[in-house]
Amino acid sequence: SRTVRLAAIPGDGIGPEVVAEALKVLEVAVGDEATFEVTEFHLGAGRYLETGDILTDDDLAAVASHDAILLGAVGGDPRDPRLRGGIIERGLLLRLRFALDHYVNLRPTTVYPGVPSPLADPGEVDFVVVREGTEGPYVGNGGALRQGTPHEIANEVSVNTAYGVERVVRFAFEKAQSRRGRLTLVHKTNVLVFAGGLWQRTVDAVATEYPDVAVDYQHVDAATIHLVVDPSRFDVIVTDNLFGDILTDLAGAISGGIGLAASGNINPDGAFPSMFEPVHGSAPDIAGQQKADPTAAILSVSLLLDHLGLPEAAARVTAAVEGDIADRATRASSADPRGTSEIGSAIADRVRASTSTSSVRR
Ligand code: NAD
Ligand code: IPM
Ligand code: MN
């Protein structure tokens, strides 16, 4: 069977807690189809405070030599002055996304039956946000004048290239075509006329090649209304890096909690390994207490397996999660009394029941 080399970056806070459960599930999910060799990388705020290194060129090369990456979360205590300015988030997470050309940040949302969604009647919700991953205001194209004075001017310029927008828009159209054939561009073209204009023109142009995909447009502020009031209307949303970041935390909340939201940072060309991670962060408020829901990390494993061409294993993981979530719904209280590793083990048990042999070497 084929061998997959997986780089695991547990990271900080609840990252290691949820990655442990994700690997537990991975071990039982792949049957004879593949053998996983997992290499763990000690990266994140913890490593930085110990050694001063965030992501060395050697680290990057080593991570990049793998077939795929599983990341927990990075970012330390926000009150720690040594970590100010998102030094870890930018130097590690964003550097990986940029260096490995993860131009598609794929963030699916499903409201599973029985899930405790804050929406009273969410309807049949199943959409995916295709968030651009390498451009926008994330590129660090900014600066400040007269910093610290009353006359300070702070600029953060959003970079949008025709090349970068077109490739992610094309991906979104392909996705829509393989799903329910609906694509929504979300932007703010009434104010951000240059970037918005490029996005709208690109969508209009690519749309002519996909006559079977129905295209619409929403301003990002209105999109937040529709996501809460009528989320079942969405199939594929394509949007820029920052809008996508914000919309997908909201999407996580409506799907029953950020602990359920999975994502893939994809390099569709296959030139670099793709990276799978929960949408949530390191959650310092609950770290080390076994309070984190590992489901998002486990569903990220499902996305990873799908990406690697192991759809049966991916489906076993998703089915096990669905089963576990349905079980949660039958409890009297909506709060899950189980700890992180109990949830992981319960899902792993369900997967095991549907798989024969495991072939993961660590
Ligand atoms: P967060 O996602 O870590 O936490 C937001 C809220 O959601 C908190 O109340 C937290 O307890 C809760 N939460 C998060 N994950 C959960 C889970 N699995 N189960 C149950 N509850 C969960 O966002 P934040 O507080 O804004 O950020 C904390 C740190 O994480 C910051 O340093 C931030 O930069 C970083 N961050 C990292 C990533 C990443 O590595 N991919 C993503 C987002 C934020
Ligand atoms: C996410 C996170 C990151 C982002 C941060 C930590 C840089 O919020 O993955 O959603 O903004 O992309
Ligand atoms: Mn985010």
Image (cartoon, rainbow, N blue to C red):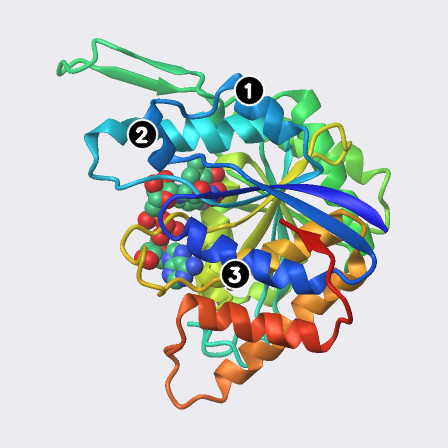
- The residue that label 1 is drawn on is 58
Residue 19 in sight in this render: yes
Numbered mark located on residue 21 in the image:
3
Q: Measured from the top left, where is residue 287 in percent x and y?
A: 32, 55
Judge by depth and name the residue closer to the eye, 148 or 215.
148
Q: Residues within 10 Å of mark 2 (few under 14, many from 20)?
A: few
Mark 2 highlights which residue? 50
Residue at the extreme top of the image, as rendered = 146
Residue in view at x 66 percent, y 67 percent = 318
Q: Can residue 251 be seen in this view?
A: no
For the residue marked with disc 3, what is the amino acid? Glu
In the rendered image, which quarter is residue 134 located in? top right
Residue occupying the point 48% across, 33% down: 93
Give the Cα separation between the discs numbered 1 and 2: 17 Å
Q: How far apart are marks 3 and 1 (CA)?
A: 28 Å
- Circle 2 SS class: helix
Of callouts 3 and 1, which one flags the residue occurring earlier in the amino acid sequence? 3
Q: Which of 4 and 98 is in front in this view?
A: 4
